[in-house]
Image: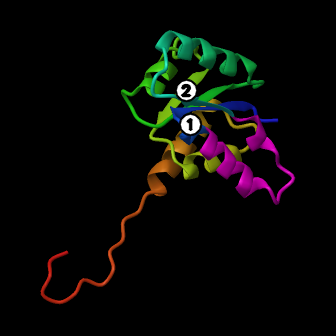
Amino acid sequence: MLVVGICIIAHAPLASALKSCSQHIYSTTEDAGCDGIACFDVPADLDVDAGIAHAAKLIDGLRCNDGILIFTDLIGATPSNIAHNFLDDPKVRIVTGVNLPAIITALSAPKDAPVNQVMTLAEGAAHAGISSRIGRVPEGTEA
């Protein structure tokens, strides 16, 4: 069981896609921690109050001892705005700009790691998981 609960709130269908990818990665192991991820795919026509109520049910359903880490996709957008309603809870942390490296790192964190440590590890992995490459540039052209 995860000590830190994980919830992904993102534009549809990103939240469930990230959970599915995590389950795919962990499918060959005995660790079913990713099955406990709560995810909320936010539809384009969502009533924000209904979205907040739905997210509250998901977050309340997470069984965790140390806190909740909420991942969102885009700061200032509806999923992020919904998540920010839960910051009054001292156990809630938010990482915006979620990607698969962030989720996998949070799932791979030591099971007794406090929520602040898991948040820091996940954010670092999100940054480190982004890379740019360029192939050979043909002579006489600009990169």
* Dominant secondary structure, magenta: helix
Task: Name the residue: 70% across, 31% down.
Answer: 4
The magenta stretch is 16-37
Task: Name the residue: 78% across, 24% down.
Answer: 63
- Disc 2 marks a residue whose amino acid type is Arg
Q: Which label sits on residue 93?
A: 2
Q: Closer to the N terminus: mark 2 or mark 1?
A: 2
Q: Which label sits on residue 44?
A: none
**Dot 1 lies on which element?**
helix
Is disc 2 surrounded by few (<14), some (14 to 19) or many (20+) residues within 10 Å?
Answer: many
Q: Quadrant of residue 130?
A: bottom left
- Cα distance in 3D space between marks 2 and 1: 7 Å
Q: Quadrant of residue 27?
A: bottom right
Position of 52 relative to 95 (above/below): above
Q: How is the image coloured?
A: rainbow
Label 2 close to label 1 by CB (< 8 Å): yes
